[in-house]
Image (cartoon, rainbow, N blue to C red):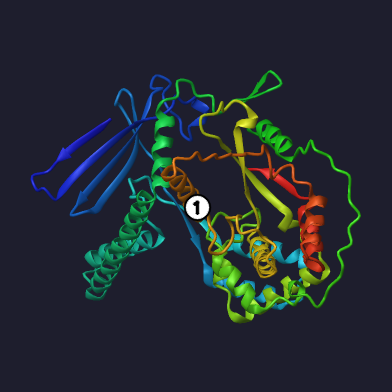
Amino acid sequence: MILWNGYKTPVSFSLTLLIPLMPLTLDQLPFSISPFAPHLFLMLSIAMFRNRILKVTTTLLSSHGRFWITLQKKIKSIDWNRIMSNSATVLNTNTRLDALTSKISEVIRDNTKIITLPAKNYPPWWNLSCHNFQKLKIFFRKRALCLISESDWMKHKKYAAKLRFHIKKASRNYWDKICNITKNPRMFYSMLNKIYNHTNQEINTVNLILHNNHYFSNPVQQSNLFADFFSDNSMKHEPIPLDYCEDCNSNLNIPIHLQEVRQAIQKTRNSTPGADGITANWFKRLSNTDLTCITSFFQEVFITSYIPEEWKHSIIVPIPKPNKDKTKINSYRPIALTSVFSKVFERILIQRITHHLLSEKKIPPSVNGFLPLRDNQLAVYKIHTAISEAHSHKKYFIGISLDIKSAYDTVYIDGLIFKCLQLGITGNITKILHNFLQNRTLQVG
C-alpha cells in the first residue's frame, strides 16, 4: 500500500509505504506484543525536498492501528586509534603464528562497543558522529541557558555547525549508496524479488525445517542439521601419492614481497569478517612497519606450509534459494564467512598461479571468468556474435548449458592437486593448497 502526501510546492513530497509483514509468532518478536494484533505492517515514511531526503522513519504498525512500536537503533563504536596501536604491539612482539589471530581479535573486541540509542525514529543514515555532536550541542545549550555563559553558547554554535556538516555528509552518502544500488539492474531486481516473496507467502514456514519426516523449530537443532548437511561429503575418494617436486627456483615459490601483500589488501573488499572478527579495514589501516610484520608472518606460513586453524574455520550462513521449499534443508545455499587473513593470503597465491597459467599458456582461449580481460561479459559477446552470424547465414546455433550439482562440495582434492602438478604448479605453493583444503571446520551462524 502506498500513501502519497503531496505538498503545494512541486519540488517536495512525502511518500509512505505500508509493507505487510508475514504472520509472526509471539516468540519471534524482540518485544512483547498483544496477541490480539497478529497482523503487522512495516511503515516506511520518506520526506524529500529538491531530490534530498529530509527524514526516513521506520515503524511497526498493528493491523488495528492502535499502537506504534519504534525500533531501537544500535551503532557500533570502534576506537581505531587504540586498536592499531595495540595491534602494532602484538605484531612487533614474538607472537606465535597460531596465537597471532586470537590476540588481534581480542584487541578489536576490547575496543569495540555497541551503543543502543534511545527509542527514537532515527534516520537510516544516522551514525555515531551525528549522535555524539547532537549530545554535545544539547549539553552546551542547556549549560549556556542555565549559566548564561557566552563561552558555552559559542561551543553550542560550534557543535551545531559540526552536527549539520555530519548530517549533510551522512545523508548524501546514504542517498548515493541507494542510487548506486538502483542503477544495478541485478541488485534492483533482487530487492523487488525479496519484497514480492515477502508479501506473497501464505504460511510462515521459514522457521521450520523438515528432516526425516520431523519438523524442527529449535535454532540449535536446525544449526546442527545444517552443519551435518553442509559438512557431509558422500563421495569418498582414494588418496593419491603426491610428489610436490620441490622447486625453489620457480617464480611460484619465491619469497613473498611487501608489494604483493599491499596489492592483495587493496583488492580485498570490506565484507563481513569471519569468526575472528578481523575486518579488511584493519588491514587497510596498517602502517608500513606493520605490513612488514604481516609479510613476515605470511612468509612463515609459505615456508612451513602450516595453515593456522583459524584460517581454515568458516561461519556458514544458509541462504534460501529462490522459488524453493524453505522447509527442505537442501533448499539453502551455504555462504561461508572466512578469515580475512586467509583471504589476503589466498589472493597472493591466486595472483601467482594466474600469472603462471597465463604466461605458460595453460588456459585455453575459450575459457572465461576469473581471468584478467576475460570476464563473463566477453563470453556473452562471443555467444551473441555466433548467434548473429548463424542467423545471417540462415543456419542453426546449438547451445548446451551444463550445471553440475554440488560441484564445489564434491571436488576430488587429491585429483585437483594432481592436476596442479601436471600444469607445472609445484613446490611449497602446491603443498599449501593441499593443506588448506584439508581438515576444514565450520559452524552455522
Residue toward you, 69 or 356:
356
Residue 262 in view, yes or no: yes
Disc 1 is placed on an element classified as helix
Q: Image check: 374 left or right of 247?
A: left
Residue lying farthest to the front in this orientation: 393
Q: Amino acid at mark 1?
A: Lys
Quick check: 188 left or right of 248? left
Residue nearest the viewer, comparing 11 with 136? 11
- Left or right of residue 434, residue 380 in this image: left
Residue 236 in percent (x, y) is at 84, 40
Q: Position of residue 178 (x, y in %)?
A: 35, 52
In this orientation, which residue lies closer to the viewer: 334 or 223?
334
Image coords of residue 310 (percent x, y): 72, 57
- Kindly give the residue lying farthest to the right in the view shown: 241
Q: Nearer the viewer, residue 279 or 387?
A: 387
Give the x, y percent position of residue 279: 58, 61
**Left-right relation of 71 to 372:** left
Quadrant in the rendering for residue 108: bottom right
Residue visible at 66% across and 32% down in the picture: 222
Give the residue number, with chain letter if any, for mark 1.
382
Q: Quadrant of the N terminus?
A: top left
Q: Quadrant of the C terminus?
A: top right
Quarter-of-image position of residue 132: bottom left
Direction bottom: furthest residue = 289
Q: Let me know if residue 140 appears in the view.
A: no
The residue carrying pointer 1 sits among few (fewer than 14), some (14 to 19) or many (20 or more) residues within 10 Å by Cα, namely: few
Tally of marks: 1
Write the residue at 63% across / 61% down. Answer: 340
Residue drawn at (74%, 75%) of the image: 251
Residue that appears at 69% across and 42% down: 407
From the viewer's perspective, is residue 324 above or below residue 170?
above
